[in-house]
Amino acid sequence: MVELKIESELHYISGENILQARKCVLLNSRQSKRPSRRDKWIQATKEAVEHFADDCVFLTSIGMNTWELALHLVNECGGRQIIVIPAEDGINPANVIDSVNLDFKLDPARVGFVFFNPSKSIKRSRKSCWLERDHIIVDLADTIVPVSVRSGGNLESIIAAAAVEHDKHVETRFAVEYRPAADRVTYNLNQKYINPRFAGSVWDYVTHWTRSSHTPYAGESSLAYYHDIINSDRYPRTASDTLARIVSERRIRASSRFIRGGYEVVSFTSLNPINAVKLMRWRRRYVYYSFEPYGIAIARSYVARISIKPVIYGDSQLYEQLSDEERPFFQNRGSGNADWRPEAEFRHLGDLSLGRVPADQVKLIVYRPADAERFADLCPYEVIPLILT
């Protein structure tokens, strides 16, 4: 590892002579979390990569789709790059290098890494580290290439200062109009359109509802994720795609997100879909729905055989009293508007293999009749549209 000092901050470099080449950076402000190759910023970024690939080393990073997509495009066209990463507390740079190389299938001969220690004077949050990262990358660059930059935003200020104060070359030929992100999908879940099959009936199933993913799926590489994005006319990780992946793999993958103790579980609800849709809310803070109208349901009479259990609602005091076997099924009951008990949640610890469940014990729920026609060709399960319109 070679040490580099930039404005009194210690940086760690892997790669021998890659820093000696002319360096450029492609800059994009925050974009939609649902990109596709039809997006102008992706098209322009790809054109810029192809233009500079022979003469420059690119400065890239990880943690945002704008940076990671550029990283992927550089790798795909055989270019060279330096990946700049905050050296957050406790990380092992060698392990991070191995992980990133594996995740994006990078050729170590064409890649260098810079790890910087975030300034102690700033708040040690990921976003504040990102801003410092952007300053460092622009400082390192010989050529700055704004692609889709928001007017009045941080990147615009950084670029302007670099051009005036440090006489950096700013190449604007690849610039495209910045468009605010449009991440919310609209569903018409009016009760009058709900499939009458769910109305007034006893719902003897527990349902795992899916949602869109803004990152690679569990077990999926970033290479595969960004490859699909730049080769698709629509965002390729929607809730419908998530359900299709479950059907294809015959597996529901577990997640530890929002689970106390970090246990990886698969969540279900015993609510009738006609009531579950009332809990499908847009969560602005996380830029996604709580869940979306694509799900897989398993008969209540069968769930005990495959260790799907109702959660244990309670408070922190109750959690401390639970056994190790019970804790994965604990959920804080909350209070007031944050009362989680109406979700009637069930959980399975770890991934759930659908090969353990007979096809006649499973139903798929999809948003519309057109979805039902498509999924009927993909699986042995009965497919039921949630709405009839």
Image: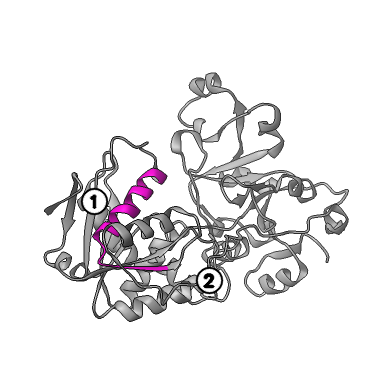
Q: Can residue 221 be seen from the camera position used here? A: no
Task: Tell me which amino acid carries mark 1.
Answer: Phe
Residue 313 falls within the magenta-colored stretch: no
Predominant SS of the magenta segment = helix
Instruction: From this view, report whether residue 63 is shown above or below residue 244.
Output: above
Q: Residues within 10 Å of mark 2 (few under 14, many from 20)?
A: many
Quarter of the image for the C terminus: give it: bottom right
Task: Tell me which amino acid carries mark 2.
Answer: Ser
| CA separation in Å, label 1 and label 2 | 30 Å
Residue at label 1?
115
On screen, residue 219 versus residue 106, left or right, reads right
| Residue 355 locus on image (x, y percent) | 54, 60
| Residue 21 locus on image (x, y percent) | 17, 70
Q: In the drawing, what numbered circle is on residue 68?
A: none
Q: Which residues are magenta?
A: 127-146
| Occupied quadrant, residue 313 | top right
Residue at label 2?
36
| Residue 91 locus on image (x, y percent) | 26, 44
Residue 143 falls within the magenta-colored stretch: yes
Quarter of the image for the N terminus: give it: bottom left
Q: Can residue 300 be seen from the camera position used here? A: yes
